[in-house]
Image: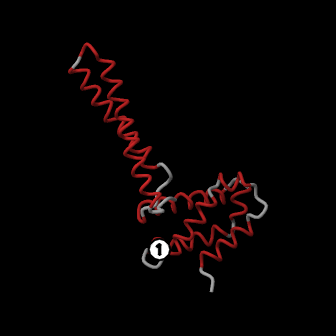
């Protein structure tokens, strides 16, 4: 007996047969299919996932139009893909590739700049050097910390 997600995947593949690979990547069809599988898995205990099943079923009926023709159908598909990804991130702990690397690099840059600014007040004769060193160290530390967290996410297979 096939599951709901297997039926939906077959419908998507049949409707998008002959579509350019570039378009499939641009519209994140693989991510959409993975999120459909996760929605089916989590719908038993997650009320929002079970509500997404209805939205997914209605969007899958028009997915070929959404990919090929700009308009309302494409907006519905994009909105659903975004909402589904946000839900998987917030409620179920799945993340985009390099999510923490980018996030921690940004916060490291901000913190490093603040530390560098304090260094300019402590060493006024070396003001630019202290600022640049703080900025660079903040980015490096943030990047390394984020990449460790991203490796953990990959190891646990929690990528969107």
Quadrant of res 29? bottom right
Residue 9: x, y in percent?
65, 71
Instruction: Tell me which residue sits at (52%, 63%) in the image.
Output: 84
Q: Is residue 72 above or below residue 108?
A: below
Q: Residue at x 34, y 35 (%)?
A: 138
- Name the residue: 20% across, 21% down: 122
Across and down, in percent, residue 43 comes to 48, 76
- Left or right, 124 with respect to 13, comes to left
Tally the numbered discs: 1
Residue extending farthest to the right is: 18
Instruction: Assign the N terminus to one quadrant of the image.
Output: bottom right
Q: Residues within 10 Å of mark 1 (few under 14, many from 20)?
A: some
Colour scheme of this structure image? secondary structure
> Which is more toward the observer, 148 or 159?
148
Image point (48%, 48%), residue name: 98
Q: Position of residue 20 (x, y in %)?
A: 75, 55
Element type at marker 1?
helix
> What residue did someone put label 1 on?
42
The answer to whether 36 appears left or right of 10 in the picture is left
């Amino acid at each position: 007996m096939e599951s709901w997600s297997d039926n939906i995947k077959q419908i998507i593949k049949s409707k998008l047969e002959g579509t350019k690979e570039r378009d499939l990547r641009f519209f994140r069809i693989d991510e959409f299919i993975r999120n459909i599988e996760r929605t089916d898995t989590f719908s038993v205990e997650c009320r929002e996932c079970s509500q997404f099943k209805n939205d997914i079923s209605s969007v899958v009926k028009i997915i070929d139009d959404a990919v090929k023709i700009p308009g309302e159908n494409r907006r519905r598909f994009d909105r659903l893909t975004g909402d589904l990804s946000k839900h998987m991130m917030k409620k179920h702990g799945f993340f985009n590739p390099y999510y923490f690397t980018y996030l921690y690099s940004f916060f490291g840059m901000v913190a490093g700049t603040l530390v560098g600014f304090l260094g300019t007040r402590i060493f006024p004769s070396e003001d630019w050097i202290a600022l640049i060193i703080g900025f660079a160290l903040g980015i490096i530390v943030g990047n390394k910390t984020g990449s460790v967290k991203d490796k953990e996410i990959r190891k646990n297979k929690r990528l969107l």
